[in-house]
Image (spheres, rainbow, N blue to C red):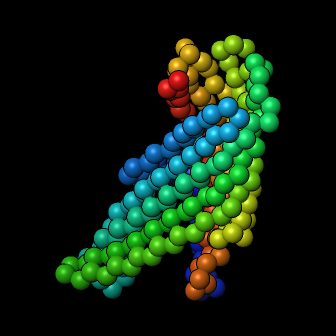
């Protein structure tokens, strides 16, 4: 996770590696569901991450350290309407049209002795996105996939790419290995500016109900 967080004309560079995020991870979930009938379908993509950290910070002039607690919640929900323009034994191509909703909440609190101070803020917005999804069946059991979209609205610009390869163990079960990169540039009210890229490895499993 990297980018810029700014408020009131001042910005701070954020650069968190996978190990940094994993160390501070409190809870996280990523899921994708699809309901399809003939050529049309609904795809829902969801990401939720809760990060938290607690440190003891020494301050010059104070006898004791200050206990500082921070937390960051990010929730992203992208429902798509899909239409299959090509479909067959070798793979498929779907057109996607939808919206991406974001929620970001952050808080920081400090405590020294009996004194305590805390700050928190939240931001919510939505972007309209257009894109496509491509699937290629390399063998009866192995397939490659790619999904991409781009758009804007509450963000000046947002886009994401998801790609990888999957193995079908049975008619109902398969596993996937891939990569996701999601970018947004949010310029909100009161001078708020959040420009962020979330990227990383995807390891997942899929179950088909029918």
Q: Inspect this view and state whether residue 130 appears.
A: yes
- Residue 57 picture location, percent across and down: 36, 71
Q: Quadrant of residue 7?
A: bottom right
Q: Quadrant of residue 71?
A: bottom left
| 193 sits left or right of 23 in the view | right
Q: Who's the residue at 73% across and 41% down the image?
A: 83
- Residue 65 picture location, percent across and down: 30, 74
The total of numbered circles placed on residues is 0
Q: Is residue 122 above or below residue 34?
A: below
Q: Who's the residue at 58% across and 69% down the image?
A: 125
Q: Who's the residue at 73% across and 14% down the image?
A: 139
Judging depth in this view, the residue of 71 and 145 nearest the camera is 145
* Image quadrant occupied by the N terminus: bottom right
Q: Who's the residue at 56% across and 22% down the image?
A: 174
Q: Is residue 182 above or below residue 114?
A: above
- Residue 42 picture location, percent across and down: 61, 43
Judging depth in this view, the residue of 16 and 87 nearest the camera is 87
């Amino acid at each position: 996770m990297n980018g810029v967080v700014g408020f009131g004309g001042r910005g701070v560079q954020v650069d968190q590696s996978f190990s940094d995020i994993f160390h501070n991870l409190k809870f996280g979930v990523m899921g994708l569901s699809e309901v399809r009938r003939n050529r049309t379908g609904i795809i829902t993509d969801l990401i939720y991450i809760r990060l938290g950290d607690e440190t003891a910070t020494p301050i010059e002039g104070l006898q004791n350290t200050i206990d500082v607690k921070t937390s960051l919640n990010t929730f992203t929900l992208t429902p798509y309407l899909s239409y299959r323009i090509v479909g067959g034994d070798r793979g498929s191509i779907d057109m996607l049209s939808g919206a991406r909703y974001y929620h970001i909440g952050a808080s920081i609190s400090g405590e020294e002795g009996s004194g305590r101070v805390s700050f928190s803020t939240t931001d919510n917005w939505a972007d309209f996105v257009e894109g496509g999804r491509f699937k290629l069946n390399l063998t009866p059991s192995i397939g490659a996939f790619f999904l991409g979209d781009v758009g804007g609205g509450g963000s000046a610009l947002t886009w994401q790419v998801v790609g990888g390869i999957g193995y079908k163990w049975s008619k109902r079960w398969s596993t996937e290995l891939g990569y996701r990169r999601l970018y947004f540039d949010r310029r909100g009210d009161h001078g708020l500016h959040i420009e962020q890229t979330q990227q990383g490895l995807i390891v997942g499993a899929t179950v088909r109900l029918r």
